[in-house]
Amino acid sequence: MSSPVRLTLPALLTAAGAALAAWQMLPVLDLQPKAIILLIMIFLAVLMGSFFLLQKTLNKTSLSRRTISILAAVAIMGGFAIAFIFHLSFPQKELVLQTRTIQIRISDDTAGSGSRSLRFRSLNNRYRGIPFSDFTIAGDWQREGDDLVLDPVRGDESLTYNGKSGSKVALFFTPEATSAIVEIDWGDGRTETVQVSQLSQSQQSLMISHDYGPAAARLEKLNFLVNLYSIVVLLGSLIFFYLAWLVYLLKSRPRAFCWAFLLLSVATSVIRLVNVYHFPLGWDEGTYSRAAMQYGEKALSFQWAQIPEITYNHEHPALVKLTFAIPVILDARESFRQAGFSDWNNAELAKEDYTIFTGRLVSAVFSLLTVQVLTILINPIAGFFFMAHSLAEEFGAQARLEAMPMLFSFLSIWFFAKYLKIIRIVSKKKAAQTLILSAIFLGLTAASKLIYCVVAFAMAAVAISVWWKDRALWKRLLPAAMLFGVISLLTFFVFNPSMWVDPYNRIAMMFGFHENYQAQSSEIYPWWQPLVWVTRSVAHHPGIYQVKSPLGRAPELFFFSIDELIFILACIGFSSVWKRNKIYLFWFLFGLVFLFLWGTKWVQYACVLTVPLCIAAAYGAQNCMNFLQKKKSELRLD
């Protein structure tokens, strides 16, 4: 079977999942012409895009058919597992539910006495409250707020609903009626008559419910699985591409390296997951989670255009909080309960607490990716140190802003360093691709948290040093710098929707907040406080100038506490960094100077230095091993 034919089926499944996800997120319940056209366009775009990505990935990685089959199976099972463990699904639409006609007829109980009014509140089809616009109304009903009111009841009024329903439906009335009879035809051959006068005055509402039986319950579970399809396919696609490129990057490495990578990945996953579940609530986790909830609520109410207008927590860009909002949009705990599936794993948490929990998981994923990227692009020792560094451990398992920009800033500076190395020896196209990747990651860094853009100063310093050695390079470096700046700014703008509305004033608000906050809080810590953050583990941070963080007061929750050793090894390795890859030393020095100059000295700012410290410590560890081996050889000679 030819490659294009083999790729057609997975591309079709992915495109169908994307179209279904788009349909679930559209603010309409019926397939109107505009919605159909939009879904067809999304289907075709994703079909072509997934086909291209699959073909490029498989051609580049040259994976065997057996390996591809194994990775695909693992990806699908992983998608199912993640969806079920964390109760994820796109908002449910009643795609395969049965359409029923429910008729509500009102008659007057002439034997009754007292008020002769009736207030109808809503019909719930188990998935949503049905708007009054979906009813056929007969009689003298009056709209009062969110209710339909009959006053008086004459006996010739009715309501008819013709639409989808789940296994159970419920009608809600208020206790105002004391002499009305409600006759309900449930649309399955069964009718029910209720005398509203029997309602106790202490009740706030009367619920009349109906169960359509086992067949409807099975259809409801099928509807749940159909809705689940889109999230499983999209998660499975992400996992597949991630695994395929991981296998490609590792297949040419020595077996010892692959085992080290596997052990580091497993250990980091275990550590970060344990931390996610057991770390106490950190400062600002609630702030960022509430911002994510606002983004998610706008998406769930189909008010996408209003997301850029949100100014809550405007002092920071939006990308990390938008990423935290994804689990908010996919929060399907109620749907899982309705379908009769397990509701374990923090399913009982309130919305904000669950958002903090899932936000922590997002941070853990990016922290794991940073460990893996450092292991592959630098060496396993650097990956180990980042896994063990207490700042990386703390902010890699909390719903804070640090985990994503730590990864993006490193990728930006790594691709830039690679660009400077290959600028003379490879084609302009290849060098330009590397530069563009660096610029994109810098833009993502800025859209995550601006302080991490200090890496741009290190890039500029190294670029100037390269130009100083070879003045003829200015003809390539100058247009490259212009291209780099344009792409970085464009990426920052695209991934930071808070800039889409009145960008000038939004930037002024952002920098104005930080300037005012510095003036108000500059005396909390001394100017040299950043040295404490980078030389001491979180558990050993002194609480002299400010109350220690909740996690700093709980050192037993850390797996490691070796920041002191990492810093000492980094000092030993700085000389090697200068000789072999000075851009990381510039990163550390510019970051440290910035922390000295910046008015506020909060501990999270020191995360800017965590990656270059771990890289320098890896060089330092190698220097120590080389020194010991040399001494061992000398002792043998003696």
Image (tube, rainbow, N blue to C red):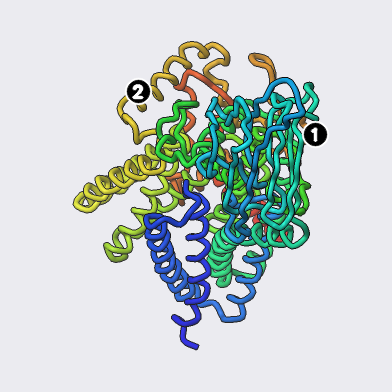
Where residue 617 sits, quadrant-wise, is top right
Residue depicted at x 52% and y 72%: 10
Task: Tell whether 112 sits left or right of 532.
Answer: right
Residue annotated with mark 2? 508
Where residue 283 sits, quadrant-wise, is top right
Residue depicted at x 61% and y 26%: 152
Judging from the image, what secondary structure is the residue with disc 1 in?
helix
Q: How crowded is mark 2: few (under 14 residues within 10 Å), some or many (20 or more)?
A: few
Q: Where is residue 432 in the image (x, y as percent from the top left)?
A: 30, 58
Front-lying residue, 305 or 638: 305
Residue depicted at x 57% and y 44%: 329
Residue annotated with mark 1? 556
Task: Tell whether 538 sits left or right of 422.
Answer: right
From what the image shows, is residue 295 above or below residue 372?
above
The residue type indicated by label 2 comes to Ala
Front-lying residue, 494 or 183: 183
Q: Where is residue 509 in the image (x, y as percent from the top left)?
A: 38, 22
Counting residues from the N terminus, which is met first, the one under dot 1 or under dot 2? 2
Front-lying residue, 152 or 343: 152
